[in-house]
Image: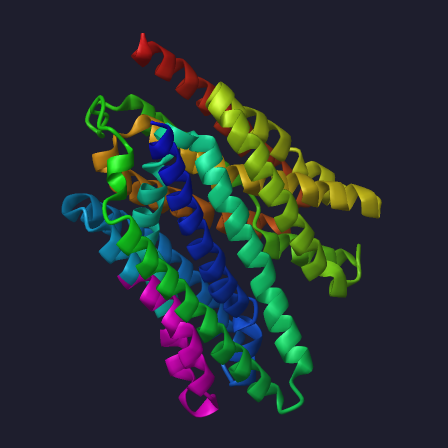
Amino acid sequence: MKNMKKQALIFLILLGIISLLSDFTHEGARSIYGTYLGIIGVSAFAISFTAGLGEFIGQALRFFTGVIADKTKKYWLMMIVGYALNLLAIPLLMFVDANIWQVAIVLILLERVGKGIRAPAKSALASFTTPHLGAGKAFALQEVMDQFGAFLGPLFVYLILNLNQGSELNGYQLAFGLLGIFAIFTLVMLVISRLKYPNPDEFEIKTIEKGFKGNSSFAIYMVAISFIALGFIDYPLLAYHMGETSSIDVIFVPLIYSGAMGIDAIAALVFGILFDKIGTKSLQIAMSIAMLFAPVFFFANSLWMLLIGIGLWGVGMGAQESILKSVVSTIVSKDKRATAYGIFSSVFGLAWFVGSTIIGAIYHWSIPFVVAFSVLMEIIAVVMLFVLEKNQKRQNQ
C-alpha cells in the first residue's frame, strides 16, 4: 500500500508538470489574444464573439468527450489528441497576419476544442489517485501547479514583448513561436507519463457502484454548482469596474490579477486539505467567505477594501478549481467519472455564461443589484451544499 501511495504521488506530480507546462503555453497565449487580434485588424465584436464562442465550445464539448473517455477507457488517447490540438495551434499563430486574420480565429477556436477534448480525461486520471492521497489534496496540488504555470506564462510573454525591438506584430508572432517550445515540452512529458503509467485507473480499487441512476447526491450537487457559477463574477468585469471608477491606475490591474491567482493557489491548497478532513463542509466554508467579495469590492471606499475584495474573490476561485472537482470523485464511481466531469463542466459553464450575461446586463443599471444578485446566488448555493451533506450522510447510513 505504501508503494502504491508513492507511485500515485509520482503520477500526480507528472500530471502536475504537464498542467504547469500547458498552462504556461495557453495562458501565456490567451493573455495577448485580444491585443494581437486587434493588431491584425479583427473587430472588437469579432474578438468578443470568438472569446465567448471558444469558451462555450470548450465547456459544452466536455459532456461528449467525457462519455467517450468512459466508454472507450482511452484516457491517454483523449489526453494526447486534446493537448496536441490545444497547444500546437498556438505556435501556428506566428504565421498569421492581417491578410489571413480568419485563420487566427480558427486556430484560437481549435485551441479551446483541444481543451474540451482532454479536460474530462485529465480530471478522471487525477481522481484515480484520490484513494491514496485524498481527493482534496490531489486536486489542490493540481491547481497549485496549474496556477504557477498560469502566472509564469503571461509574465514570459510580457518579457518577450518588451525585449523585442522589431515591429509590434513581430513581437506577438515571436511570442507565439517561443510558446511552441513549451508546447513540445508538454507533449514530451505526456508521452513519458503514458509510458510509465499506461493504466493509471488501477490506482483506484473498484468499490461500490455510484453511477447516475438514483444518485441523488450528484443531482443535488449539479444544482449547487449552478448557483455558485450564476453568482460568481468574472475578473474582466472587476477590471472594467476598476477602470470605470478610477479606483486604481489601470496599469496595476494585471498585477492585481496575478496577486489574486497567488491567493487562488494558496486557498486551493488550504481548502483541499480541509476537504479531506471535513468533506463538503469545507466548500460551504469557502463559499461563505467568498460570497463577501462582491459587497466588499463594489462598495469599497479605499484601496485596502478593494484589495480585500479581490482577495476574497481569489479564495472563491481557489475553492472552485480544487474542491468542486474533489466532490465529484467522492460521489461517482471511477468507471463513470469522466462522464461526470463532462456533465459537471457543461452545467457549470452554462450557468457561468447565464450568470455573466445577467450581471453584465444589470451592471449599468444598478451596482447594488449586482451585489444583491451575486450574494443571493451564493447563499442558495451554500444551502444546497448543506442539503448535499445531509443527503450523503443519509445514503451512507
Q: Is residue 301 left or right of residue 360?
A: right
Region rendered in magenta = 81-109
* Residue 154 pos. (x, y %): 59, 65
Does the image show residue 373?
no
Instruction: Report the predominant secondary structure element of the magenta stretch.
Output: helix
**Vertical order, 89 against 371 (above or below):** below
State left or right for residue 120 relative to residue 47.
Answer: left
Query: What is the tally of numbered marks visible in this picture?
Result: 0
Residue at the extreme left of the image, as rendered:
72
Point 22% across, 29% down: residue: 211
Taking the spot 71% from the left edge, 58% from the top edge, the residue there is 255
> Hey, which residue is sitting farthest top in the picture?
397
In reply to whether residue 89 is colored magenta, the answer given is yes
Is residue 133 depicted above or below 63 in this figure? above
Q: Nearest the camera: 58 or 326?
A: 326
Farthest residue, direction right: 302
Picture layout, residue 152 above or below residue 157: above
Q: Vertically, is 291 above or below 87?
A: above
Q: Is residue 151 visible?
A: yes
Q: Look at the image and say whether residue 234 sits in the magenta stretch.
A: no
**Residue 300 rendering spot, x and y as whole percentages:** 78, 43
Residue 51 coordinates in the image, percent (x, y): 46, 65
The quadrant in which the N terminus is found is: top left
Which quadrant is home to the C terminus?
top left
Residue 21 in the image: x percent, y percent? 47, 61
User: Is residue 386 rendered to the left or right of residue 127?
Assistant: right
Left or right of residue 334, residue 326 in this image: right
Residue 293 sits in which quadrant? top right
Q: Residue 18 is drawn in which quadrant?
A: bottom left
Which scheme is used to colour this image of the protein?
rainbow
